[in-house]
Amino acid sequence: MFIDAGTLDPAGTYRLLVGSVVPRPIAWVTSGISPRPVNLAPFSSFAWVSQHPAMLGFTINRRPTGRKDTIRNIEEDGEYVVNIAGDAMLNDLHASSQWHGPDVSEIDVLGLDLLPSTIISVPRLAGVPISMECVHHQTIQFSPTGGEFVVGRVVGWHIADEVMVDGRIDTELVRPLGRLAGPRYSRLGEVTELPPVPGG
Ligand SMILES: Cc1cc2nc3c(=O)[nH]c(=O)nc-3n(C[C@H](O)[C@H](O)[C@H](O)COP(=O)(O)O)c2cc1C
């Protein structure tokens, strides 16, 4: 089957994207500075876009009613935290995508705990293996229907001692989640290690 991308509407394009780019890592983002409540939401259109300085990017789509709380907070405060969940928190991560008004904190709804960040004011999520404190760098809009690509610079890393082995993050101890199409997720499967390729 061949599908000409030019024949697809936004919903059809989305369906192919979420089936083709899999599994996707998930940025579990805390945003918002008091007196606004701390917002929590997952975003799987997520990747790192610069190695040094470390910069992360993810796309925030618009609701018919307007921008999502996360991008409003990020642009207003200029900072946020990208948390990485271990698979034990899958149910909370999934539930945190439910829409709540800007005055409601998903942290309170789900009974989760926060910890202070070190450099920025937005708190990080407790109980996760990795949290990256980020300062907003740029928001890029590629098209009117494509969502907004939010890029931030990592200014600090919090890594649970138990997943750090010999100065490296041990992925098998992190137990990361992947997002598939729809409300479907993958857990870390068998890990295969190959010899390094010269010059690779
Ligand atoms: C695993 C997962 C990944 C998601 N990825 C995205 C994404 O990349 N972009 C997006 O706009 N929404 C994504 N969503 C939906 C948002 O999490 C959802 O709209 C959320 O309510 C946004 O919250 P906010 O309005 O508090 O910012 C995802 C949902 C789930 C469950």
Image: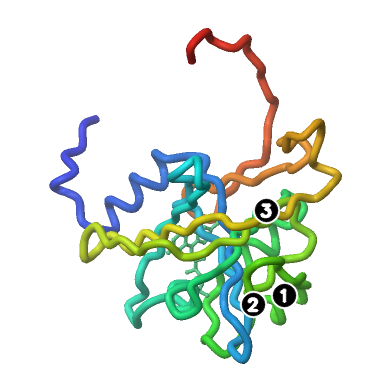
- Indicate yes or no: mark 1 CB to ligand 1 under 8 Å: no
CA distance for labels 3 and 2: 23 Å
Image marks 3 and 2: residues in contact by CB distance under 8 Å:
no
Ligand 1 is within 8 Å of the C-beta of the residue at disc 2: yes
- Give the residue drawn at x 45%, y 80%: 76
Q: Tell whether label 1 touches label 2 (CB within 8 Å).
A: yes
Q: Secondary structure at mark 1?
A: helix
Q: Where in the figure is residue 132, as x and y percent of width and height?
A: 63, 56
Q: Residue at x 64, y 46 (%)?
A: 177
Mark 3: C-beta under 8 Å from nearest atom of ligand 1: no
- The residue that mark 1 highlights is 110
Q: Which mark is residue 106?
A: 2
Give the labeled residue for mark 3.
157
Q: Position of residue 17 (x, y in %)?
A: 35, 46
Quarter of the rendering containing residue 145: bottom left
Q: Position of residue 199 (x, y in %)?
A: 48, 11
**Dot 1 amino acid type:** Leu
Type of the residue with mark 2: Glu
**Residue 51 placement, left or right of 39:** left
The N terminus is located in which quarter? top left
Spatial CA distance of label 2 from label 1 is 6 Å
Q: CA distance from mark 1 to mark 3?
A: 24 Å
Residue 165's tag is none
Image position of 188 (left or right of 17): right
- Looking at the rendered structure, the secondary structure element under dot 3 is strand
User: Which of label 3 and label 2 is nearer to you?
Assistant: 3
Name the N-terminal-most of marks 3 and 2. Answer: 2
Tell me which residue sits at (48%, 50%) in the image: 55
